[in-house]
Amino acid sequence: MKYLCLVYCDEGLLHSLPDSPEDAECLAYAQSLHAGGRIVAAEALKPVQTATTVRMRGGRMSITDGPFPETKEQLAGFYLVDAQDLDEALNIAKGIPAARVGSVEVRPIRELQP
């Protein structure tokens, strides 16, 4: 059974608190999980303002900059896709069945710096 562990934090404080992890520590932890055969994929996300949300209603796509989901929506799944650019990623997102009743947040991956 696989689990996705989503890390939520205040982006404004993430790298400024005394106990804030450095990228190298996060990368080392992911590598230790990989060495133990416990990881499928792990990625750090770029800041929330880089997100784009896709909704499909009545066969029409609407796009909103940022995540801005309504509070009644909770994260229900995760798709990691390899797209040439944001437009291709948005086209992939609009095909996800849950986009018809919820929303799909499309967000670039941030490379960890060792």
Image: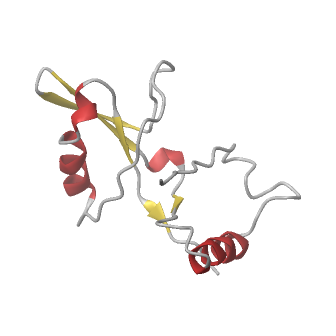
The image position of residue 27, as x and y in percent, is: 63, 74
Q: Which of 78 and 57 is in front in this view?
A: 78
Look at 52% across and 51% down and name the residue there. 3
Name the residue at the left extreme: 59
Look at the image and tell me whether residue 55 can be seen.
no
The quarter of the picture where residue 58 lies is: top left
- Up/down of 99 relative to 73, above or below: below
The quarter of the picture where residue 34 lies is: bottom right
The quarter of the picture where residue 89 lies is: bottom left
Check the picture and name the quadrant holding the C terminus: bottom right
The image position of residue 37, as x and y in percent, is: 55, 74
The image position of residue 44, as x and y in percent, is: 55, 61
Compared across the picture, whether 111 is left or right of 86 comes to right
Look at 25% across and 63% down and name the residue there. 83
Compared across the picture, whether 61 is left or right of 36 comes to left
The image position of residue 72, as x and y in percent, is: 48, 18
Q: Which of 111 and 4 is in front in this view?
A: 4
- Up/down of 13 relative to 85, above or below: above
Q: Which of 70 and 97 is in front in this view?
A: 97
Q: How many marks?
A: 0
Look at 79% across and 59% down and name the residue there. 20
